Image: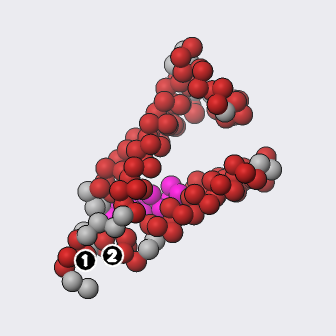
Amino acid sequence: MDAVETHRRPRAVPIVAAFLFAATVIAAVVGVSLLYPNPLLDRLWKLNPPAEAAFRAIGRVSGVLLLALAAGTLACGIAMLRRRRWACWFAIALFAINAAGDLVSLAVTGDWARSASGVLIAGAFLYALTRASVRRYFRSS
């Protein structure tokens, strides 16, 4: 393995970072809409009424938790692009938790399409993050 190979960023890294940035925006918007309800943001809940019911049942603390998640995904995305080893582990943990949540959701709701697609997507990200080239890239940082 030469020095150039250890410094070349694997394609998975910016893709995962972009996904984390998208997750940041979504979590922040949903968190704000839960903490500060307003007609504009309330329209977004029409996209997923069961999620609205679940989040509203938890209360305002769900908004705070989503804003914390947004902060975590933002920090992780930035750190991945800066080649921080902790960011790779944090992303792996996030996607593993997401996959586990989708499996629980499948057992509770029986919604095969949504749950199975979530597990498959999280699994694809986990596969990408655990590839040898990605491990080497972050190990040599």
Q: Is residue 78 visible?
A: yes
Q: Nearer the viewer, mark 1 or mark 2?
A: 1
Q: Residues within 10 Å of mark 2 (few under 14, many from 20)?
A: some
**At label 1, which amino acid type do we have?**
Glu
Residue drawn at 50 percent across, 55 percent down: 94
* Image coordinates for residue 31, horizontal then vertical, percent: 51, 30
* Image coordinates for residue 96, horizontal then vertical, percent: 56, 60
Extreme bottom residue here? 1
Residue drawn at 60 percent across, 21 percent down: 43
Horizontally, residue 42 falls left or right of residue 69, namely: right
Residues at circles 1 and 2 in contact by the CB criterion of under 8 Å: yes
Q: Which residue is mark 2?
A: 136
- On whether residue 112 falls in the magenta region, the answer is no
Horizontally, residue 97 falls left or right of residue 46, namely: left
Please, is residue 50 above or below residue 76 in the view?
above
**At label 2, which amino acid type do we have?**
Arg
Residue drawn at 63 percent across, 27 percent down: 45
Please, is residue 82 above or below residue 131 in the view?
above
Q: How much space separates mark 1 and mark 2, taking CA atoms?
A: 9 Å
- First in residue order: circle 1 vs circle 2: 1
Point out the image quarter for the C terminus.
bottom left
User: Which corner quadrant of the image does residue 140 belong to?
Assistant: bottom left
Horizontally, residue 45 falls left or right of residue 65, namely: right
Extreme left residue here? 3
* Image coordinates for residue 14, horizontal then vertical, percent: 35, 56
Write the start and end of the magenta stretch as one range.
85-96
- On whether residue 92 falls in the magenta region, the answer is yes
Horizontally, residue 57 falls left or right of residue 72, namely: right
Q: Residues within 10 Å of mark 1 (few under 14, many from 20)?
A: few
Question: What predominant SS class does the magenta segment belong to?
Answer: helix
Identify the disc placed on residue 5: 1
Please, is residue 14 above or below residue 33 in the view?
below
